Amino acid sequence: MKKKLVYALTILFSVLFIAAGYAYTSSKYTFVENTSTAEKAKIVRINDEKTTELSVANEKYRYTVVYFTARILSGENKGQSVDAAQVIDEMYLIQMGKVKQGSKIILCENFDEKVDTEYIFSEFIRTDSLIILGLVFCLLLLIFGRMKGANTLISLAFTCLAVFLVFIPSVLSGLNIYFWSILICIFITVMTLLLVNGADAKSLAAGAGCIGGVIIAGGLMKFMDLFLHLTGQTDECSIYLQQLNPDDPIDLKALIFAAIIIGAVGAIMDVAMSMASSLYELHEKAPDASAVSLMRSGLSIGRDIMGTMANTLVLAYIGSSLCTVLLLFVYDATFLEIMNKELIIVQILQSLVGSFGILFAIPFTTAISALLYTGGKIKKPAIKYLGTDEKSDGKPKKEPQQNSFDKDFLDSLY
């Protein structure tokens, strides 16, 4: 009954937090007005294709227009058939493939005077394939995880809603990014652990260890900012963001802080939960083990976990900046220049700060778990095994309720 009550209260609190957070943050900013229309459509048939050769600076380019008829699948004109066109201009380096009959696409209002159609091709519909992949993932998660798998999906949904409906509007509203990023991390940690594991000692230990690791990561990020001279302008997107409101521009350095701790909270929570769960199982097998013994075992487990999780963060951030690194090498930039580019520095900083969070979450979680599970029992228990009691006239002692596995396991701990 208690578990169900905690579960229901967590769901209720999460809904109220997201709803209230969205109402508060979204009321303080306005969207940039978008006058263009975008409709989902499916190509019924290809009507014609015309190619023209152009010459620019003694270079020849082909300008191709593919005319087709499409049926609109969304919006006010849903069900109507319209004439549209796709423009393929070789002057642009990146070109999409030609449309085909049956392709699902996005149509926009045509402003190109060279093309005599009401609508023009914008993008292929790619979300349908991703939705299928996501549904397969959800199905497998439910098959293998069962009820915990369902709770994982619910927590994942709340996590996405908190980021997109609360944190992002708070950034665009000019609110304190540091405060809201930390608040979102705490919400994600508490909500996920309560939904997936419930309100027990494991969740308390994992949550405390995770929050401790995130605080260390955030503090280290602020400390390193004093020496790295970061501007936050790592790419063209950051420049566009700063120009949204010149009178009160977005704090780009605070965005780096938010990106680091939000990006690391998942890995830190994973490590904290692994530590708390492992030590809980050890305590179940050896209930008489002291806190010191559990701490030693936890640190031994943590050393194994730490190496792989640190690699996970480093490789993830290397992969995200791989194209930029390749481009810098192609243009013969020196190693010194590459390693001091702000984009590269930020990626390295994210890896190191996230790894520090994991590193400190391990002893935090280990210590808290050991103290919670043992009730603060520090000393080694006195364990008596089979033998002869001298004061009982040579009669054998009564065998304690302990199997050989528990005896060997406790011996290994001490």
Image (cartoon, helix red, strand yellow):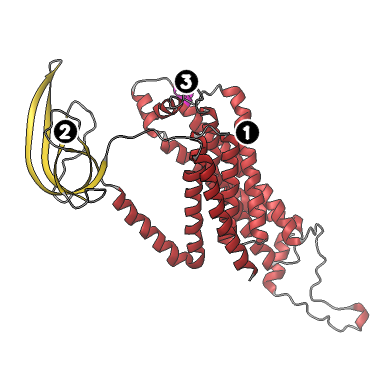
Residue at position x 71%, y 53% from top? 368
Left of 313 or right of it: where is 411?
A: right
Q: How crowded is the residue under tag 3: few (<14 C-alpha within 10 Å), some, or many (20+)?
A: few
Q: Main secondary structure of the magenta part?
A: helix
Q: Is residue 77 left or right of residue 16?
A: left
Q: Which residue is mark 1?
A: 220
Amino acid, disc 3? Leu
User: Going by the image, does 371 lie left or right of 331?
Assistant: right
Q: Which mark is residue 88?
A: 2
Q: Amino acid at mark 1?
A: Leu
In the picture, the quarter occupied by the N terminus is bottom right
Q: Nearer the viewer, residue 231 or 315?
A: 231
Residue stretch rendered in magenta on the structure: 338-342
Of labels 3 and 1, earlier in sequence is: 1
Secondary element type, mark 1: helix
* Residue 59 vertical position relative to residue 3 in the rendered view, above or below: above
CA neighbours of label 2 inside 10 A, class few (<14), some (14 to 19), many (20+): some
Is residue 293 visible in the rendered structure shown here?
no
| Relative vertical location of residue 196 with respect to residue 120 in this rendering, above or below | below
Q: Dots 1 and 2: beta carbons under 8 Å? A: no
Q: Earlier in the sequence, mark 1 or mark 2?
A: 2
Residue at the extreme right? 391
Residue 246 percent coordinates (x, y): 47, 22
| Residue 324 x, y percent position in the rendering | 38, 29
- Asked which secondary structure carries label 2, the reply is strand
Q: Nearer the viewer, residue 300 or 19?
A: 19
Could you tell me how far apart the alpha carbons at marks 3 and 1 are, in whole angstroms? 24 Å
Q: Which residue is mark 3?
A: 336
